[in-house]
Image (cartoon, grey):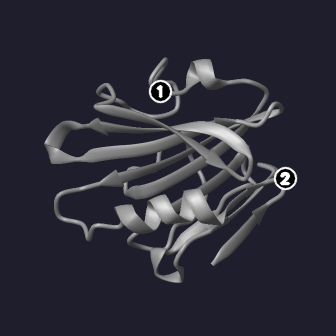
Amino acid sequence: MTFHNRVGEFAYSVPASWNARSCEEIRQGIVVAQDEPYICGGDWYPDAWLFAISVSGDQRHLMPPYNPAYFYLAGPRSETEVVVYGTVGHRYVAPLDRGWVETYYVFFSGFRTYAFVYYQRPTDPDRLADFDRSVQSELIFS
């Protein structure tokens, strides 16, 4: 399933089984996935295990690991530099409460800041390899 998020200025592909939804009609380019089909709205997505956001300008200072304004973060365990579609970014892994692990990417294209977050809950199927592949191979910045 491919999303051409015009507001967020990116295209992103994920497996169709993820029940992902592009919520660009309500604010910045947002993509959400959770086990049940998602209806866009509100500021908090308590059941989402995939969350992507795109905001105008250099907003890296509002993203983890510098600031948890957009995502809860307990502090990264690891950081790796990645290059996706010619844009340098960073992949972070952070432990959360209740045995969850947060893996997220942050990019700045020169015009927009992009963040892609995956929450692995202990009781969920492990989708991390698919998440990494979707960001590193299926993401295109407009």
User: Label 2 crowding class (10 Å Cα cut-off): few <14, some 14-19, many 20+?
Assistant: few
Q: Nearer the viewer, residue 36 or 32?
A: 32
Q: Is mark 1 on a helix, strand or loop?
A: loop
- x then y, percent, for residue 25: 76, 56
Amino acid type, residue under disc 1 in the picture: Pro
Residue drawn 51% across the image and 25% down it = 69
User: Label 1 crowding class (10 Å Cα cut-off): few <14, some 14-19, many 20+?
Assistant: many
Q: Residue furthest bottom?
A: 17
Q: Nearer the viewer, residue 116 or 138?
A: 138
Q: Is residue 39 above or below residue 78?
A: below
Residue drawn 56% across the image and 46% down it = 42
- x then y, percent, for residue 135: 57, 57
Q: Mark 2 points at which residue?
A: 142
Amino acid type, residue under disc 2 in the picture: Ser
Q: How far apart are marks 2 and 1 (CA)?
A: 23 Å
Closer to the chain start, of discs 2 and 1, is 1
Residues at marks 2 and 1 touching, judged by CB atoms closer than 8 Å? no
The tag on residue 56 is: none
Residue drawn 28% across the image and 67% down it = 126
Q: In which quarter of the image is the N terminus?
A: bottom right
Residue drawn 45% across the image and 34% down it = 71
Q: Position of 131 compared to 42: left or right?
A: left
Q: Position of 57 compared to 74: left or right?
A: right
- x then y, percent, for residue 43: 55, 41
Q: Is residue 63 above or below residue 33?
A: above
Q: What element carries label 2?
A: loop
Q: Residue 94 occupies which quadrant of the picture?
A: top left
Q: Position of 125 compared to 114: left or right?
A: left
Q: Mark 1 points at which residue?
A: 64
